[in-house]
Image: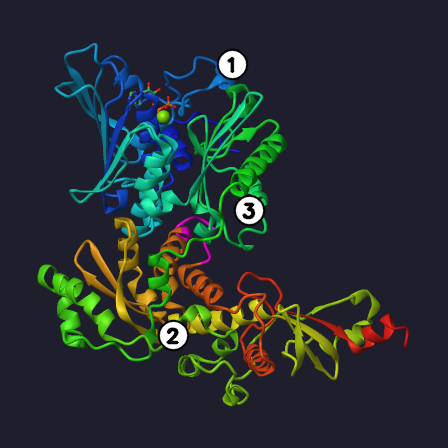
């Protein structure tokens, strides 16, 4: 064994940095938390290169005195606790004294700071943790920290960063969440010299919600408050119609600290049970106040998870409060003029031709800004009037029709009966390398031999018998009975189709008669631009008019025009989610999202022919036995098992 040594300070800092500063958003989080701890009510964050090239955080907090500034860069140097006993009464966001030395160790860092007691500020510059400059400097009261070239001396970490748009998107997301957690603070986010977000800082949560999500969303939020003993809960929860495909829009704070909480997630699941479908999540902002003695904030390197005593009691309190608030609210979605217009936007298989919409002009328009943009804005309403609304609104489309492939589907809009050719949809694709087994019912009653008759890698040849509970397709063959989950099955068929289109860049487009101007936030537009190739391969057609404007001209053949804007927003969320650890990959996640959206739902009545067509399509899927989320698409009971059940054997 080599001899044990104590690591020098700079090595220790770099090791600590591995825990504290994982990526640019962790740096922003630590610096902004310091600003909040310093009592700032204005915090401005500036980024370049998604934070990898530049992060600036400027606050108007209390500042650091000249003699304390160098100390702040020592490990475990903090003004926030004195001893371990204080860990039980932490009211600040920071307490470990690790952030500044860790960040300084892996970047170039410049800090300028002044307290109100001093006429003069102090500046320090660090290069990879070493002091490069220090001394008095003129600056306003407060602190500004400038980080450049993050991870320049830890290339492995630098290499692992995602793209500028993804890292920047995560930071924007953090700033939105902090704005919701601290409505009294005015947060601003700037990128490339432009302000991309500002929170009002009025101290009213609903104002912050309107700034982050928009006024329309804010109107769909329901207030919640509850007090039980020493615990208080306050905030807003979204009406069920605001549901999302991830939990990203659940913002929870405990004593002003942004946290992830399984307990709160469970409470919300419980409260929304039956109001939104499984796999969908509400929008919620919950601010909890719990005495510091009842929580442990020191259980996670980034302090984003905490331990709460009496978690069960808290879960119950939140779920009953939220449920109660929702019950008292009118939850029937209002069909306002906006909604009607959106739902009745017709779709065609042909591009809608406006004079400038030749592919050449389109290309020019994409490179252009000003004049073309106004042309579009002027033309859009006229175009809407000029085109007769012949196509049937997608929302009343007969379920049977959309099991057919795109070409069929779009031509049978007015025909509620499934077309005959649905029956002839047998594909000649080889059965792929399916590895999952059919989930058998009551295995224990069957011998392994008998099981093997249907428990093969080949998808069985099935004849549809009927529909059960408008949810399951009943099928049979010589081996026995099969039940297919209609939603899961269709989801899988569509998933493979979308995934194939993405892999081979082979989009199926339906052009919108009236292009939709996408009302998105800056980082969302940037993500869309970055993943444009993937998004277009799915069948979306985006027109780019400079920085602020994105116009949606086409959507995938099988999605419904009325939902396209919501769908785009969810796609952005999905892409962002993939930037986090454990993501499945953007192509997989986008295909799964679109498939889930477009698939027939449980509860829809299907014609026999439509069911047979779906079953046949599932049979030729590459992996027919599970839906994209891993749930089974079909279960079976063998003849043998039936015999045993009826005591015939
Ligand atoms: P911690 O926040 O855990 O105390 P940090 O390394 O983040 O550790 O900061 C060290 C100390 O530097 C803090 O305790 C605080 O006294 C001071 N400090 C850091 N940032 C600021 C700021 N923006 N305004 C005022 N003081 C600050
Ligand atoms: Mg700190």
In front: 311, or 122?
A: 311
**Magenta segment, which residues?**
577-584
Q: Secondary structure at mark 3?
A: loop
In front: 336, or 213?
A: 336
In front: 306, or 125?
A: 306
Tell me where residue 126 appears, x and y as whole percent: 23, 28
Work out how far the residue at label 1 is from the one at label 2, CA to CA, in angstroms.
62 Å
Rendered residue at 28%/76% (across/down): 388
Specify the label residue 85 is tagged with. Answer: 1
Task: Provide the residue designation for mark 2.
Answer: 557
Q: Nearer the viewer, mark 3 or mark 2?
A: 3
Specify the label residue 272 is tagged with. Answer: 3
Residue 350 magenta: no
Q: Quadrant of the C terminus?
A: bottom right
Q: Nearer the viewer, mark 3 or mark 1?
A: 3
Residue 579 magenta: yes
């Amino acid at each position: 064994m080599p001899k044990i040594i104590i690591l020098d300070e700079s090595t220790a800092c770099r090791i600590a940095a591995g825990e504290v500063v994982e990526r640019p958003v962790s740096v922003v989080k630590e610096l902004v938390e310091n600003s909040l701890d310093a009592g700032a009510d204005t915090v401005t964050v500036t980024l370049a290169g998604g934070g990898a090239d530049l992060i600036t955080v400027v606050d108007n907090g209390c500042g650091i005195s000249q003699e304390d500034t160098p100390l702040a860069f020592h490990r475990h140097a903090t003004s926030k606790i004195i001893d371990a006993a204080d860990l039980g009464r932490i009211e600040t966001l920071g307490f470990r004294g690790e952030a500044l030395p860790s960040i300084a160790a892996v970047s170039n860092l410049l800090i300028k700071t002044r307290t109100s007691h001093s006429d003069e500020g102090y500046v320090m510059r660090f290069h990879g943790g070493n002091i490069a400059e220090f001394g008095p400097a003129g600056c306003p009261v407060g602190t500004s920290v400038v980080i450049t070239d993050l991870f320049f001396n830890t290339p492995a970490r630098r290499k692992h960063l995602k793209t500028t748009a993804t890292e920047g998107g995560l930071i924007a997301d953090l700033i939105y969440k902090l704005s919701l957690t601290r409505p009294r603070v005015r947060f601003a986010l700037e990128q490339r010299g432009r302000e991309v977000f500002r929170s009002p800082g009025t101290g009213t949560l609903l104002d912050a919600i309107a700034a982050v999500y928009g006024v329309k969303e804010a109107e769909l939020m329901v207030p919640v408050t509850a007090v039980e003993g020493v615990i208080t809960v306050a905030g807003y929860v979204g009406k069920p119609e605001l549901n999302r495909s991830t939990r990203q829009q659940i913002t929870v704070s405990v004593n002003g600290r942004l946290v992830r909480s399984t307990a709160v997630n469970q409470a919300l699941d419980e409260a929304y049970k039956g109001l939104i479908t499984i796999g969908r999540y509400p929008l919620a902002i919950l601010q909890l106040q719990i005495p510091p003695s009842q929580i442990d904030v020191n259980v996670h390197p980034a302090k984003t998870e905490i331990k709460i005593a009496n978690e069960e009691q808290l879960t119950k309190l939140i779920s009953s409060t939220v449920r109660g608030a929702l019950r008292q609210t009118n939850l029937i979605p209002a069909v306002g003029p906006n909604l009607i217009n959106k739902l009745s936007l017709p779709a065609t298989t042909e591009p809608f031709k406006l004079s400038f919409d030749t592919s050449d002009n389109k290309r020019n328009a994409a490179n252009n800004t000003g004049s073309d943009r106004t042309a579009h804005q002027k033309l859009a309403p006229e175009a809407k009037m000029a085109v007769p609304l012949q196509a049937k609104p997608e929302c009343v489309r007969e379920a049977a029709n959309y099991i057919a492939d795109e070409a069929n589907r779009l031509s049978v809009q007015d025909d509620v009966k499934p077309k005959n050719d649905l029956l002839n949809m047998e594909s000649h694709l080889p059965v792929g390398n399916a590895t999952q087994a059919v989930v058998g019912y009551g295995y224990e009653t069957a011998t392994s031999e008998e099981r093997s008759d249907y428990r093969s890698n080949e998808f069985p040849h099935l004849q549809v018998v009927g529909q059960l509970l408008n949810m399951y397709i009943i099928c049979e063959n010589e081996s026995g009975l099969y039940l297919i989950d209609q939603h899961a099955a269709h989801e899988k068929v569509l998933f493979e189709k979308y995934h194939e289109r993405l892999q081979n860049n082979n989009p199926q487009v339906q052009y919108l008669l009236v292009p939709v101007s996408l009302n998105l936030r800056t980082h969302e537009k940037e993500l869309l631009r970055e993943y444009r190739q993937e998004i277009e391969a799915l069948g979306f057609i985006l027109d780019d008019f400079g920085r602020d404007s994105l116009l949606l001209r086409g959507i995938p053949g099988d999605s419904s025009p009325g939902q396209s804007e919501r769908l785009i927003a969810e796609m952005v969320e999905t892409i962002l989610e993939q930037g986090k650890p454990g993501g499945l990959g953007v192509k997989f996640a986008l295909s799964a999202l679109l498939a889930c959206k477009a698939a027939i739902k449980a509860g829809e009545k299907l014609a026999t022919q439509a069911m047979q067509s779906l079953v046949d399509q599932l049979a030729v899927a590459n992996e027919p036995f599970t839906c994209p989320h891993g749930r089974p698409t079909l279960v079976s009971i063998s003849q043998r098992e039936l015999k045993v059940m009826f005591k015939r054997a």
